Image (spheres, rainbow, N blue to C red):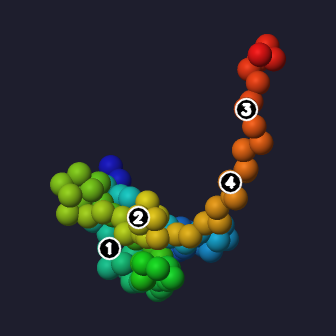
Amino acid sequence: GGENIGASMIRDLKGTVEREKAAIGLFVTLADPTKPMLTEAASAGHYESPLHGAFPKIQILTIAGLLDGTQRPHWPDLASGGQNFKKAKAEAKRGKQKDLFGE
């Protein structure tokens, strides 16, 4: 099973990524991708991260490659703290807070 794959599936994923305004799409398959699939994925271009460089917009990964560690998805490492977010200002303390019973 899983060998009925083709470039049309990559085109569908590409269309979905564009429609949903996603940065990256992953296609995971049991079978090795065909040359037309790889060509279609490459035609999608790259996602350009301002802090982390370029990443293929459509990535094709095999189950075997994921399990044996030879393949992994490539996307910006947001856990590294590279993204900047606004921080809320700390609220000034106004005195001791009373407990539930007003003591």
- How far apart marks 2 and 3 lie (CA) works out to 37 Å
Q: Residue at x 46, y 65 (%)?
A: 81
Q: Quadrant of the C terminus?
A: top right
Query: Tag 1, which secondary structure?
Result: loop
Point out the tag, 2 or 1, that comes first from the N-terminus: 1
Vertical side of 95 occupied by 64: above or below: below
Task: Bin the neighbour count of mark 1 within 10 Å (Cα to Cα): few under 14, some 14-19, many 20 and up.
Answer: few
Q: Residue furthest front?
A: 95
Q: What whole-number distance in Å separates the C-alpha atoms at marks 1 and 4?
A: 55 Å
Residue 34 spot, x, y in % from top left: 32, 73
Q: Nearer the viewer, mark 4 or mark 2?
A: 4
Which element is circle 4 on? loop
**What is the three-letter code of the residue carrying label 4?**
Ala
Q: Which residue is mark 1?
A: 34
Q: Which is more toward the observer, 3 or 23?
A: 23
User: Quick one: SS at disc 3?
Assistant: loop
* Residue 53 x %, y %: 42, 83
Q: Sequence order check: which comes first, mark 3 or mark 1?
A: 1
Vertical order, 25 against 57 (above or below):
above
Amino acid at dot 1: Thr
- Residue 66, given in percent of the width and then of the height, sits at 27, 56
Mark 2 in CB contact with mark 1 (< 8 angstroms): no
CA gap, disc 4 and disc 3: 16 Å
Residue 69 position by quadrant? bottom left
Residue labelled with disc 4: 90
